[in-house]
Image (cartoon, rainbow, N blue to C red):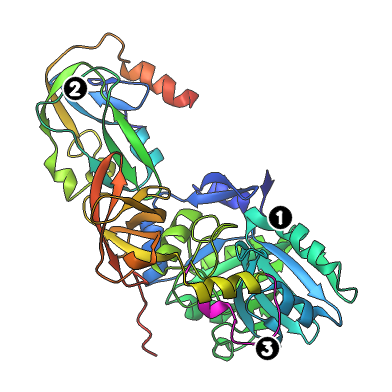
Amino acid sequence: MNIPTHLRYTKDHEWVAPDGTVGITAFAQDALGDVVFVELPEVGRELKAGEAFGVVESVKSVSDLYCPTDGTVAAVNAKLAEQPELVNQDPYGEGWIIRLDPHQSGAELLSAEDYQKETEGA
Amino acid sequence: MKDTPITSWHRTHGGKLVEFGGYWMPLDYGSIVEEHLAVRQRAGLFDVSHMGEFLVEGASASPFLDHLLTNPPSRLNVGQALYSPMCLPTGGTVDDLLVYRLDEKKYLLVVNAANIAKDWDWVSQASQHWPLVTLTNESDTTALLALQGPLAQSLLQPLASIDLNTVSYYHFSPQVLIDGVPVLLSRTGYTGEDGFELYLEGTAAPTVWQSLIDRGAIPVGLGARDTLRLEARLPLYGHELSETITPLEAGLGMFVRLKQPGDFIGRGALERQKSEGLQRKLVGLNLVGGIARAGYPVMDAEGHAVGTVTSGTHSPSLKKPIALALVPLQQTAIGTPLSVEIRGKMVSAQVVATPFYRRDTHL
């Protein structure tokens, strides 16, 4: 399973990059199956770590997205409205979901190694 | 939790296994959308061995089933099948099922997996007044494979001991050899496509499954089975039908034979419902901006809660959200503007004609 080492992770399978970009992991998109709808927050919304900020829907299921850190939504991936499948195809790249700016570093976040242990335990 | 004869194959071939109706069943093998489209465009193979099979036989089998079901099986020819709801005296639905006429005095009922125990009790109870009826539950020893899609016939023909053109829609042949294995083969399905269902001994099922896969059938899980049946507007028990939803409300009036003489369980209540007028009925909805799911509230144009979504998904064929909902009769006209509450937000919806998807029936 692809788990880039430069990202930080939550137990809920979100990732956050050093620049505040947030998405879901390869493990999460695989478990969800074909993503067909992503509900995005409004730009400017202030979020707390652990707060639900959106929803990702596959054909079969509806899952909340949880914010990895405190921060303000600076951008959302508008491409997902037309191409939600980008979350499956490129979860750490074109399938990003929001960018937080400014954002806290988030002491509770997991390293790639620790996240891998989480997914192995699942 | 039980395994079907094919569960171990699913496990070793990337199947995402889920519990359904007491069995470990494949939800998908990686992509519901791809499996769905394989059935629409080519041929998909389903393990639906979780379904229940009851044999009903004896001198009174025909009148007994005419009493038990809303669509009388006695008018079937041997070798023919029909779909019927099975109702409570209240008109609510115990289950919906297929009936195969095997013989003058012998029928096969095929019931939903989640209802096997309930149906067995219900049918057994009802048969107490019919001494010349014998019931046998063959659910545990019978496997059921469904091969569905435009290429189903051409894929199956080289393995079959008969000309498949001789098996027409809702007919069956009781003793076809498929790859040398005896099978009851019917031209039926739950996808809106042409296709076949194969009833066979569980012990022989893995061989037939593998032969069909080797010839190019794509394995398809329950996830795509649900999206396929929803596009074709086929009801799913527990969603469009239940003990509190009558077949008339679900739009299945053509399977409730009120014009024919003869009493059946639920007849009085269903006649009353028809003569007094339905309070609510099942409609198809298109939505813009969200996916409605079962249980979500439906609002009228003034924003009053008037109904409930029974099933909803993203349609892989149409690439947009579709749903079925129970709404008041005055809200059922095609084009009626409604909305569905999705996570606290109103998403606009419109009543549309169903089925959402209909295959080309060019022959």
Closer to the camera: disc 3 or disc 2? 3
Image quarter for residue A22?
top left
Q: Does B252 appear in magenta? A: yes
Position of residue B345 relative to residue B37, above or below, is above
Q: Which residue is mark 1?
A: B118
Magenta-drawn segment: B250-265
Judge left or right: residue B105 versus residue B92. Answer: right
Image quadrant in which the C terminus of chain B is located: bottom left
Closer to the camera: disc 1 or disc 2? 1
Q: Which residue is mark 2?
A: A17
- The crowding category of the residue bearing disc 1, from other C-alpha atoms within 10 Å (few below 14, some 14 to 19, many at least 20), is few
Q: Which residue is mark 3?
A: B75
Is residue B141 at all visible to an observer of this figure?
Answer: no
Q: Does A20 appear in magenta? A: no
Is residue B142 at all visible to an observer of this figure?
Answer: yes
Q: Are dots 3 and 2 on a single chain?
A: no
Q: Chain of mark 1?
A: B
- The crowding category of the residue bearing disc 2, from other C-alpha atoms within 10 Å (few below 14, some 14 to 19, many at least 20), is some
Q: Chain of mark 3?
A: B
Q: Are dots 1 and 2 on a single chain?
A: no
Q: Main secondary structure of the magenta part?
A: loop
The residue drawn where x is 79% and y is 73% is B56
**Residue kind at label 3, given as amino acid type:** Arg
Q: Secondary structure at mark 1?
A: helix
The residue drawn where x is 57% and y is 72% is B272
- The crowding category of the residue bearing disc 3, from other C-alpha atoms within 10 Å (few below 14, some 14 to 19, many at least 20), is few
Residue B150: percent from the left, percent from the top? 42, 77
Position of residue A23 relative to residue B253, above or below, is above
Q: Chain of mark 2?
A: A
| Viewer-side residue, A22 vs B289 | B289
**Residue kind at label 1, given as amino acid type:** Lys
